Image: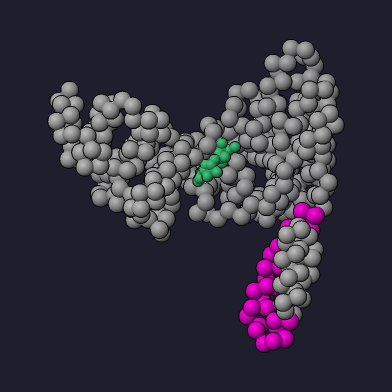
Amino acid sequence: MQTEIIKIIEGGISGDKEKVYNYAKLLADNVKKDGNDKFSKRIIDLLNNKKGKLTSLDSLMAKPVDTESRAEMVEISNPQLSTQDIILDKYVEEEIDSFIKYYENRDKIVLSGLDSNSSLLLYGPPGCGKTTIAQYISSLTGLPLVTARLDALVSSLLGSTAKNIRKVFEYASKSDCILFLDEFDVIAKLRDDKNELGELKRVVNSLIQNIDTFSSNSILIAATNHHELLDPAIWRRFTRVLEINKPNEAEIEKLLEVFLGNENFKTIIKNQKQLQQLKNLFSGFSHSDIKTIVQNCLKQSIVENKNETTYVDIVQEIYLYSNHSIKNEMEFIKFLLSHNITQKEINENFGFSMRKIQSIAKL
Ligand SMILES: Nc1ncnc2c1ncn2[C@@H]1O[C@H](COP(=O)(O)OP(=O)(O)O)[C@@H](O)[C@H]1O
Ligand SMILES: [Mg+2]
C-alpha cells in the first residue's frame, strides 16, 4: 500500500494524471482485499468522477502560441467552485441554470430540429463575478475551462490576430470544453488601430465564422466590461446574453453572511438596524469590493488578536477602502457619526477626545 501512495504522490507532483489514476485504482483494489470496502469505494467513486476530466485535459496538452511572441494563448484550469463561492442575483442564477440545462439536453434539442449551440455573453462592471461565473459553469458541467488570453492573441502582426483566433478555436475543438474569451473587449479596441482599417473587419469576420462553427458539445463564454464596444454582429452570435450587475440588497446580505460567517471569527452585528445600515453602505460596491473590505476587517482583527469583528470595524474598513487613509479626521468622525456610531463608541474605538467628537457633531 505504501508503494501505491508514493507513486500517486509522484504522479501528482509531476502532473502525470495517468499515473495517479492507475496507482489509485491499484490502491483501491488492495484496500478492498484488506476488507476496507468503504474506503475502496470512495477511491473508485473519486476516480469515476474525475476520469472524464483527466482524459479531456490530456488531449489539450499542446497549447497554441502566438507565432511572433511565442506566448501561449490559452490557460487551462479545472475549477472546483461550490454554490457558497458565488452569490448571484436570483434572476441571473435561473438564467445560468437554464443555460446549463439546454447544454445538457442538447441531443434532444437537435432532434427537434433546433440549433443547439451553447454560447453565453456576460457583460457588466468589473468585480461582479463574470470570470467567477465561467469557473462556476465549468465546475457544474465538469468541462475543463480553456481561457483565451486575449492580450496574447491580439498580435501586432497584421493579419495574425485573425489567425490566432482560428488557432484558439481549433485547439478548443479538440476536446469538449468551455472556451472562455475573457476581457473580450480587447478585440474591439482594434478599432483604434489607425494603421490598418481592414484589420478589425478581418478579426470580426474570423470571430463570427469561428463562433458559428464551434462544436455544440462545447460551451463558449465571453465576458466584457465594455459591451458598448462590441460589434452588434458579434453580439448577435450569442444564444444568451446576461448583464451581471453590482449586488442588490439580497446579494449584499448573502455576501456578508458568507464572508463574515468564517467560523474562526465572531461577528457582532447587534441588530437589524445595523445590518440595514451595512446593506446601505455597501450598495454601489462590487462583489469583489465587498469581499476585500470584509477580509481586511477579519485580517485586522487577527493582527489585533481580537478574533471578533464589530459593526464599527466594518464601517471603518468601508471608509478606508474608499478614502485610503484617515488623514482627514473630521471627515472620518462625521462619517462614523452619520452611520449611527455613538460618540462614546468613537472615543473608545479610535481614541479621539470626547471634546473633539462633540465639537464635530455640532457642525
Ligand atoms: N457574485 C460573486 N459572488 C462571490 N464572490 C464574487 C462574486 N463576484 C466576484 N466575486 C469575488 O471577486 C473576485 C473578482 O471577481 P471576478 O469574477 O473576477 O469579476 P469580473 O470578472 O466580473 O471582473 C472573485 O475572485 C471573487 O472572489
Ligand atoms: Mg473578469
- State the residue at coordinates (52%, 51%): 85
Q: Nearer the viewer, residue 263 or 101?
A: 263
Q: Which secondary structure class fits the magenta region best?
A: helix
- State the residue at coordinates (22%, 34%): 352
Residue 69 percent coordinates (x, y): 81, 30
Residue 343 percent coordinates (x, y): 18, 37
- State the residue at coordinates (43%, 52%): 258
- State the residue at coordinates (75%, 27%): 154
Q: Point out the residue furthest to the top here.
A: 194
Q: Nearer the viewer, residue 362 or 356?
A: 356
Horizontal side of residue 15 vs 125, given as left or right: right
Residue 137 percent coordinates (x, y): 62, 49
Residue 45 visible (yes or no)? yes
Horizontal side of residue 274 vs 291, given as left or right: left
Q: Which residues are magenta?
A: 30-58
For the C terminus, give its image quadrant: top left
Looking at the image, residue 107 lies above or below residue 330: below
Residue 175 percent coordinates (x, y): 80, 50
Residue 109 visible (yes or no)? no
